[in-house]
Amino acid sequence: MTEDTDVARHYSSGTLMSRIRKALHDAGIETSLDPDRLAPLDEFHVGGRAATVPLIKELKLGPGKYALDLGCGLGGPARYAAGKTGAAVVGVDITAEFVTAAEELTRLCGLANKVKHVHASILDLPFSDNIFDAAFMMHVGMNIADKHRIAEEAARVLKPGSVFAIYDIMRLSEDDLIYPVPWAQSPRQSAVVASDRYRFALEDAGFEIVSETNLTEVALANSDGQAEGTDGPDQIGVNILLGQDGSEKVKNLLANIRSGLVAPKVIVARLSE
């Protein structure tokens, strides 16, 4: 299997949108969605919306700006960025089922004129050079071994001087992690590395590191409900995405964080002029 195929297979179920529609129906919000109501579901990363807000601020977006969400999933951060800043956002994801669901949710949120979703690999982006004003990637790199290729493709499609913000689970120790976790059933599917690996890749691609921030406290303060499968109003949460062993995956992730094996970190980098 190729890496992209393996990643798509891990996140695909064939029933994602039907499960989301049922949850929305049960909550009585089928036709017109408030993007904020979807946050417990579509902010599919540790810390949820509380982690998204400061990351999007780093991008300095506004009307007339064009941003790229690498590994967009269901499109929650992209919709948040567009709704709060007025920027246009394109999300890219290798999992076709996520892209289809993201398109429908974006339409139901009334943001289809501002947010688009594309089925493609972030290692081979279907865009011209130097067209985006900013890029972000949230909880995606842990599935992709080739961090240099991620940075190179981001550098290619960004305008000089643009910001690229990465939020990911990063290693603090080389000791074995507890599996399964949300991004992997076993070590074979996991590509979690220390922040130095990201920094090296970014610098090699022409980025300057602006900052590195550990969000462990934010993540732990906003993720305990996910471990119980009750992380949103009317049960609209990431439990819908993670399947029957979802609670175990989240509990293991939080245990790995609490034990100091990994940490959720944000790296902000700026492309050289």
Image (spheres, rainbow, N blue to C red):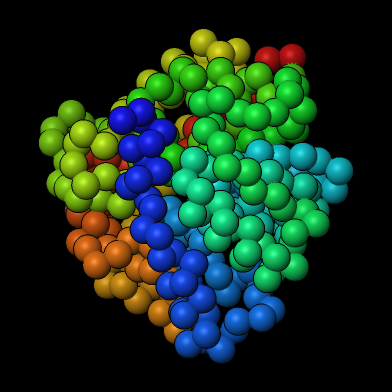
**Residue 172 is at least partly visible in this image:** yes
Residue 203 lies left or right of residue 176; in this view the side is right
Task: Please name the residue shown 66% across and 62% down the image.
Answer: 106
Residue 81 lies left or right of residue 196; in this view the side is right
Residue 184 percent across, percent down from the top left: 27, 45
Residue 135 percent across, percent down from the top left: 64, 35
Point out the image quarter for the C terminus: top right
* Image-quadrant location for residue 239: bottom left
Residue 47 percent across, percent down from the top left: 43, 57
Q: Is residue 196 placed above or below 53 in the rendered structure?
A: above
Task: Please name the residue shown 26% across and 37% down the image.
Answer: 189
Residue 91 lies left or right of residue 242; in this view the side is right
Nearest the eye: 263 or 158? 158
Residue occupying the far right of the picture: 64
Task: Please name the residue shown 31% across and 72% down the image.
Answer: 229
* Image-quadrant location for residue 80: bottom right
**Residue 161 is at least partly visible in this image:** no
Q: Is residue 74 placed above or below 199 in the rendered structure?
A: below
Q: Is residue 257 placed above or below 193 in the rendered structure?
A: below
Q: Is residue 47 placed above or below 194 in the rendered structure?
A: below
Q: Report the label total.
A: 0
